[in-house]
Amino acid sequence: MRINFILALAKFDGYSWLRRAPATTIGYTSMPLALLFLIYVLSGGRLVEYAVAGGLVALMSTTAIMVAGSTAVFRIQLRIQDLLVATNATKVEYMFGMAVANLIFCVPGLIIYAVLGLYFGLFTPVTVLITAIVLLLLTVAVISIAVYVGSIFKSISSVWTTASMLGVILTMIPPTYYPYTLLPKPILYIVALSPVTPASVILQGYYGLAPVNNYMFLVLFAEAVIYLSLARKYSRWGDN
Amino acid sequence: MIEVSRLTKRYDDGTVALNNVSLKLNRRITSILGRNGAGKTTMIRIMSTQLKPTSGTVKINGLDLVKDRDEIRKIIASIPQEIAPWDVASPQEHVEMFLSARGLKRSDIKHLAEKSLKELGLWDVRDKAMGGLSGGMKRKTFVAMALASQAEIIFLDEPTTGLDPISRLEVWSALRKINGTIVITTHYMEEAKELSDEVVLVNNGRPVMQGEVRKLLSRFNGRVRVEGPKGKYKVADSHISYMRIKDAQRLLKEGYSIKQISLEDLFIMNGGGAIED
């Protein structure tokens, strides 16, 4: 894996955009922050810690799912993927480059949530480490889904529609903004197909908002590995 | 050296884009000429490892296109026909990203990008977003990528389409300075004639003629193209025939016009019709 190329692609796709249109970051951050505000108002502040934990997870997963749109634009509209296919760049390097490019946009959001997490006393050295691991695994899993979606459709509008729908399914149905203990176990296992579910369950547990469920680490790790392998095998990369 | 043997490409919808093509390309600059849909782009996409052939073999500098794909990708650079710039990135960011994808060292990337951007007159706009540049500058940025690539073999699919005459000359000048072998597709006769050491005329998925332009045309020394009310070939609204100068002069009185035989005529004689749009 060539880190130089991953960073060059991230600079080309993400940093160049951020430099010339910094307001784009607002789009990536606005939805989780709006939900945080809504939950704060509706729960009278009682569920705000859930909203902070859920907001972190939602921010990373919605940013990751946006990679579907970027890869579709590069493949269908700009044909930059064709340009790269005939080089030494690999599909996985391309995936990670596009991922880092999109993650650049959620940095301001991450900073806001870091401040909120500190304010509400969610962070200790252990929970910071756990959060970093969970967000990394979550990002790998969701980006794999996004890259696959971005590579299979013939039109960009189909990719955007599917990505928007997936964004809702992946982030709103799982226990992102509410305690996972509210879900009956069979339903929890079903929604655990979305990597957002194990990520939320782990963070809620370690933030002291719900019982710790370490099995969800296995689920999240397995999903990251499986979704990455599937994307690597089945997402389109040239004709090969 | 590129050796193509019995190459066929059949797409999923049944379209046969290339039909049992065999040819050797070993000159410095080769132009593949043909009308839209003749198979030029399919040929260049296969040779540059973007498409798999249905059958047949392609060898590039002795490496097999299918078995040695990764090795081939180290020695080639390919700029697709329909590529468009990422509007928020600059020409320099485009070139540097491409060089990084090709695996060049970071220390070389800056230097090569600067050299190629200067060569193509893009240095002053190197840091501007592509969205604000003219169509010619956008196209030249892609040629700058090829120029900087250091590849042994460069494939350019219609590199000058949409360029104004001055930009086209700048691109030709830059291409002549590339050290490697260049294969371009074009439907501009003048470009093929001015730029190439060899041309391959393609029609209906098959090469119909190959060679140096001068040698190909020399076969018709003493003959001219005659256009008038009647002729052997009908191309758009024109009726065209080819004959000796002596015979053609007699037709002048009947309203026929006479022209020197060009590359386009070779194509018409081989059943291709007019090439340039």
Image: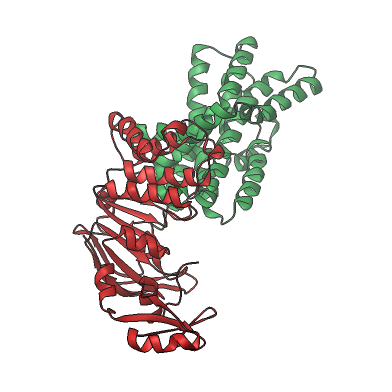
Chain colours: A green, B red
Give the vertical position of A128 relative to B76 (above or below): above
Q: Looking at the image, which is closer to me, B197 or A17? A: B197
Q: Residue at x 53, y 39 (%)?
A: B133
Picture layout, residue A74 above or below residue B69: above
The x and y percentages for residue A230 are 46, 48
Residue at the left extreme of this rendering: B62
**Where residue A227 sits: x, y (%)?**
48, 44
Along the viewing direction, whichever of B133 and A174 lies nearer the viewer: B133
Badge count:
0
- Nearest the eye: B218 or A167: B218
Q: Could you say which quadrant of the image residue A212 lies in? A: top right
* A20 relative to B201 in the view: left or right: right
Q: Quadrant of the N terminus of chain B?
A: bottom left
Q: Is residue A95 left or right of residue A44?
A: left
Q: Position of residue A4 (x, y in %)?
A: 35, 32
The residue furthest front is: B253
Q: Position of residue B68 (x, y in %)?
A: 24, 55
Q: Residue at x 33, y 59 (%)?
A: B194
At 27% from the left and 73% from the top, the residue drawn is: B216
Residue B182: in sight, yes or no?
A: yes
Quadrant housing residue B132: top right
- Of B175 and A178, the residue lying toward us: B175
The answer to whether residue A229 of the structure is visible from this angle is: no
Q: Quadrant of residue B54?
A: bottom left
Compared to residue A188, the image places residue B200 above or below, namely: below
